[in-house]
Image (cartoon, rainbow, N blue to C red):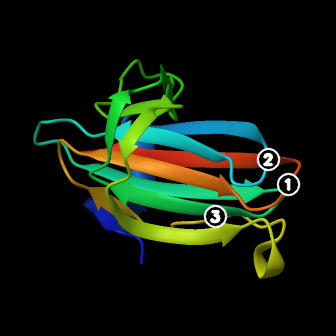
């Protein structure tokens, strides 16, 4: 179910929250890919939420050429955050920046608590994006780790879409 908010009561229509957030310059995305070589290779992406009253509402979709296991952990630990990823504001006229901080390749010292897991790129999901088909509201001041493990030998490609808004 899409969260609906009233935008123009006098005209009697509603606008989905995500659309309103895009128009307000408060919706961001990361679109990236990775080539992963080797059975058992682990690739991490990390997201840290702000220590403020801001709420992060997030979704993710991942597609793959080979079979991978995708796991999302909450409360992970790290010794180095890795490389910062620059989010893109979906409203290209907005200069707003998000409070959520995304990173690629962190040095992980503990995964945290597993909150979601799936296989992608094989079986019934071959060639199909899998991910959260719903929105999660992340905890404030928290670390989220996306752990992607290659389940077969050879080079395989991942296609990653992560998108969110904040309020």
Rendered-image quadrant of the C terminus: top left
- Please say if the residues under marks 3 and 1 sit with CB atoms less than 8 Å apart: no
Question: Which disc is residue 137 wearing?
Answer: none
Q: Earlier in the sequence, mark 3 or mark 1?
A: 3
* Residue extending farthest right: 154
CA gap between label 3 and label 1 equals: 14 Å
Q: Disc 1 to disc 2, how far (Cα)?
A: 5 Å
Whether residue 26 is visible to the viewer of this picture, yes or no, is yes
Viewed as shown, does residue 38 lie left or right of 15? right
Q: Earlier in the sequence, mark 2 or mark 3?
A: 2
- Residue displayed at 81% across by 71% down: 122
Residue drawn 53% across and 31% down?
A: 104
Q: Are marks 1 and 2 in contact (CB under 8 Å)?
A: yes
Considering only vertical position in the picture, is 50 above or below 95? below
Residue 81: give x, y in percent of width and height. Answer: 39, 27
Vertical relation: 135 (above or below) 51: below
- Residue placed under numbered mark 3 in the picture: 69
The Cα atoms of the two marked residues, 2 and 3, are separated by 13 Å
Q: Residue at x 53, y 42 (%)?
A: 44
Q: Nearer the viewer, mark 2 or mark 3?
A: 2
* Residue that badge 2 annotates: 38
Q: Which mark is residue 153?
A: 1
Q: Judge left or right: residue 161 versus residue 115.
A: right
For mark 2, give the secondary structure.
loop
Query: Relative to 42, is 117 above or below?
Result: below
């Amino acid at each position: 179910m899409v969260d609906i908010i009233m935008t123009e009561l006098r005209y009697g229509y509603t606008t989905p929250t995500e659309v309103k957030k895009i128009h307000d310059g408060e919706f961001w995305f990361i679109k990236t890919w990775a080539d992963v070589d080797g059975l058992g290779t682990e690739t991490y992406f990390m997201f840290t939420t702000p220590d403020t009253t801001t709420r992060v509402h997030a979704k993710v979709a991942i597609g793959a050429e080979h079979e991978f296991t995708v796991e999302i952990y909450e409360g992970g630990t790290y010794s180095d955050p890795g490389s910062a990823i620059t989010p893109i504001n979906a409203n290209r006229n907005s200069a707003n920046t998000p409070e959520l901080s995304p990173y690629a390749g962190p040095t992980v010292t503990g995964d945290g608590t597993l909150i979601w897991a799936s296989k992608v790129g094989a079986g019934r999901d071959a060639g199909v994006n899998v991910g959260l088909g719903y929105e999660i509201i992340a905890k404030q001041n928290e670390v989220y780790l996306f752990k992607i493990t290659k389940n077969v030998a050879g080079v395989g490609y991942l296609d990653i879409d992560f998108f969110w808004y904040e309020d």
